[in-house]
């Protein structure tokens, strides 16, 4: 996979998104240093207690004469323990707060980025993968802020403070203990090199599994229709097992390294016993100091043991943040021109294609070749042609879902790439071929493009699209909640709601992509009638296969392999005796012609 480069490093990126909480985060970091320092004071006090009151030369006398100091030292130990607990509590809360706020912020930005992406983006990314980015990946990032950073600071502050304290007591003893450090660093480095790619792989497997789950849930009807449940379950089981095994393998990597780290960590008390014991005998170390060394040696050994865990989590963060940063820094290609014209008014709806050719970025051949036609405001243009000839691709150029490879698409005489996208698209009502409704009420679905329209308007547009009758029969009329993607409605019913939705924005350009393919002839006729009597001016581009629809159009365009094969009115095309003529014969029977 190609390596993506970003303008900021991962840590800089985290820092950017911590804006507003950075101060709190730094306070939290200091809190971590503080409670670790507190932890070290305990052995400091116990060293004092041991040397002065238990094992020292004048221990018995001190205990008898200096009872107050003894009690004070004990009191300090208890007090600091309580204080430390409070600091730990506040500190955890602070990390949690900052991490949640980063999570919230980044998630919103990612969603915003995804929403504004081009059509091309949706061809490229799978839904399950995008879902993983806004859930699992983001959680790894939150974990980084809330836990990994804290652990790193904890390990470092503990080690640093301990070393400072150890050095202050006995330099040579400390150096002996530190002799192990270089080995640890080498081990951790090799571990990092080994485990990094595993985490990247693991993350891909998770996305794959999520995609499989998502596709099966949304495509469950197809699975059922083909009785493929068992097969799909088996397939999912495989990807689940694959994920689980990769997860285990990733964990196993650390297990391979752990014995070495553990041996190094265990070596420390041995070094202390041998070297420290010798120093004690020679009098270079007091008994209290020996107790302090021995009581604190964990503060060097434990961070070493934790390094593997920290590194694991860090690599998980690395893999996840790369995925999220890819979306975070992605930009749609089709955007407003810097000098886009501001045209808040309603467009007239004149459409012109001038020598337009188009090829999908990943496509081999051009889908549209040298298309030229014009639709005057208010006219109806019908587009027909066999499946795959490029009809949908053609109409997608009007709202600028894609840019033509060459030629120009003009609306009101101005190239569509000169408009502000929002203004252009606000003027277009589109009923797509593949109808997608939201899990909302019928009313909410019709008013999707303009949530401010009145109930009366919704009713009117439902009437226009011949939907009012069946809606009236629904259990709760317009308040009936339809399932995801319009579950609970027939194909033709969905198409009619989608038509009402397109009309409800009172567009100056109405584009219908095979919108009446699933409704009966009679209903379609009524729809055509109401489209002619709309109470607003509107140019209609209608992709249709039925002659009954195309017959009444001002212009019919017949596409063949991306080229305009025939163009003209019904009568003109019949006179040409070409494809259209054959189609009319086929659909209506020869006697009509
Ligand atoms: P029907 O809806 O079946 O009547 O076909 P259509 O005339 O609307 O065809 P459409 O414009 O959807 O597709 C024209 C050609 O472009 C076909 O050969 C498709 O395979 C191809 N095509 C459609 N969408 C994409 C895409 O996103 N990427 C690529 N590379 N090719 C596409
Ligand atoms: Mg199509």
Image (spheres, rainbow, N blue to C red):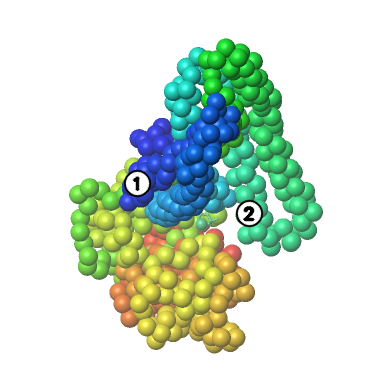
Residue 386, position as x, y percentages in the image: 54, 55
Inspect this view and state whether residue 558 appears.
yes
**Residue 215, which numbered label?**
2
Instruction: Report if the CB atoms under discs 2 and 1 are less than 8 Å apart.
Output: no
In this rendered view, identify the residue nearer to me: 48 or 464: 48
Is 410 positioned to the left or the right of 157 in the image? left
Q: Secondary structure at mark 1?
A: helix
What residue is rendered at 37% in x and 43% in y?
A: 26
What residue is rendered at 58% in x and 50% in y?
A: 128
Residue 77, position as x, y percentages in the image: 51, 44
Inspect this view and state whether residue 566 appears.
no
Q: Is mark 2 within 8 Å of ligand 1?
A: no
Q: Earlier in the sequence, mark 2 or mark 1?
A: 1
Residue 550, position as x, y percentages in the image: 46, 68
Up-down relation of residue 588 to residue 107 (above or below): below
Up-down relation of residue 256 to residue 486 (above or below): above
Q: How busy is the neighbourhood of tag 1: few (under 14 within 10 Å), some, or many (20 plus)?
A: some
Up-down relation of residue 578 to residue 196 (above or below): below
Residue 424, position as x, y percentages in the image: 30, 60
In this rendered view, identify the residue nearer to me: 86 or 294: 294
State the CA–CA distance, disc 2 to disc 1.
40 Å
Residue bearing mark 1: 22
What residue is rendered at 47% in x and 79% in y?
A: 443
């Amino acid at each position: 996979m190609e390596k993506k480069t970003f303008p900021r490093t991962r840590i800089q990126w985290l820092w950017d998104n911590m804006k507003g909480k950075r101060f709190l985060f730094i306070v939290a970091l200091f809190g971590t240093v503080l409670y670790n320092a507190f932890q070290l004071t305990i052995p400091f006090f116990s060293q004092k207690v041991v040397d002065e009151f238990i094992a020292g030369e004048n221990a018995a006398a001190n205990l008898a004469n200096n009872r107050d100091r003894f009690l004070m030292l004990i009191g300090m130990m208890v007090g600091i323990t309580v204080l430390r607990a409070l600091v730990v509590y506040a500190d955890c809360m602070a990390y949690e707060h900052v991490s949640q706020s980063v999570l919230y912020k980044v998630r919103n930005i990612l969603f915003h980025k995804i929403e504004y992406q081009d059509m091309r983006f949706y061809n490229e990314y799978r839904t399950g993968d995008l879902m993983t980015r806004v859930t699992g990946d983001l959680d790894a990032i939150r974990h980084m802020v809330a836990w990994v950073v804290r652990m790193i600071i904890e390990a470092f502050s503990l080690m640093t403070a301990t070393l400072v304290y150890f050095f202050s007591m006995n330099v040579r003893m400390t150096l002996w203990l530190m002799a192990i450090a270089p080995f640890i660093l080498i081990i951790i480095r090799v571990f990092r090199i080994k485990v990094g790619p595993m985490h990247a792989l693991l993350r891909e497997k998770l996305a794959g599994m999520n995609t499989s789950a998502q596709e099966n849930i949304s495509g469950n009807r197809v699975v059922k229709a083909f009785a493929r449940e068992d097969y799909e379950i088996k397939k999912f089981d495989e990807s689940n097992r694959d994920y689980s095994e990769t997860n285990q393998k990733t964990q196993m990597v650390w297990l391979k390294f752990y014995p070495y780290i553990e041996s190094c960590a265990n070596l420390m008390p041995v070094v202390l016993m041998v070297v420290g014991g010798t120093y004690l005998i020679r009098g270079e170390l007091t008994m209290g100091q020996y107790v302090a060394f021995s009581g604190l040696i964990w503060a060097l050994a434990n961070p070493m043991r934790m390094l593997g865990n920290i590194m694991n989590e860090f690599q998980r963060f690395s893999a996840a943040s790369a995925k999220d940063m890819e979306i975070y820094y992605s930009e749609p290609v089709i955007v407003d021109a810097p000098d886009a014209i501001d045209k808040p008014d309603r467009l007239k709806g004149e459409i012109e294609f001038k020598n337009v050719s188009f090829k999908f970025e990943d496509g081999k051949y051009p889908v549209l070749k040298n298309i030229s036609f014009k639709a005057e405001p208010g006219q109806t243009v019908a587009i027909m042609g066999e499946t795959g000839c490029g009809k949908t691709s053609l109409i997608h150029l009007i709202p600028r879902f894609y840019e033509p490879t060459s030629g120009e698409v003009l609306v009101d005489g101005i190239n569509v790439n000169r408009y502000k996208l929002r203004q252009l698209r606000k003027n277009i009502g589109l009923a797509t071929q593949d109808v997608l409704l939201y899990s909302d009420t019928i009313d909410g679905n019709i008013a999707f493009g303009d949530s401010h329209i009145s109930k009366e308007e919704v009713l009117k547009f439902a009437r226009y699209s011949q939907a009012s009758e069946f809606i009236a029969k629904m259990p709760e009329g317009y308040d009936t909640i339809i399932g995801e993607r319009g579950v609970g409605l027939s194909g033709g019913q969905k198409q009619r709601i989608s038509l009402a939705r397109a009309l409800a924005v009172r567009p100056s350009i109405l584009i219908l992509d095979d919108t009446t393919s699933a409704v009966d002839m009679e209903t379609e006729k009524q729809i055509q009638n109401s489209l002619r009597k709309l109470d607003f001016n509107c140019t209609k581009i209608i992709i249709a296969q039925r002659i009954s629809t195309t017959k009444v159009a001002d212009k019919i365009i017949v596409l063949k392999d991306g080229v305009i094969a025939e163009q003209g009115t019904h009568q003109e095309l019949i006179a040409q005796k070409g494809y259209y003529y054959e189609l009319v014969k086929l659909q209506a029977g020869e006697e009509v012609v």
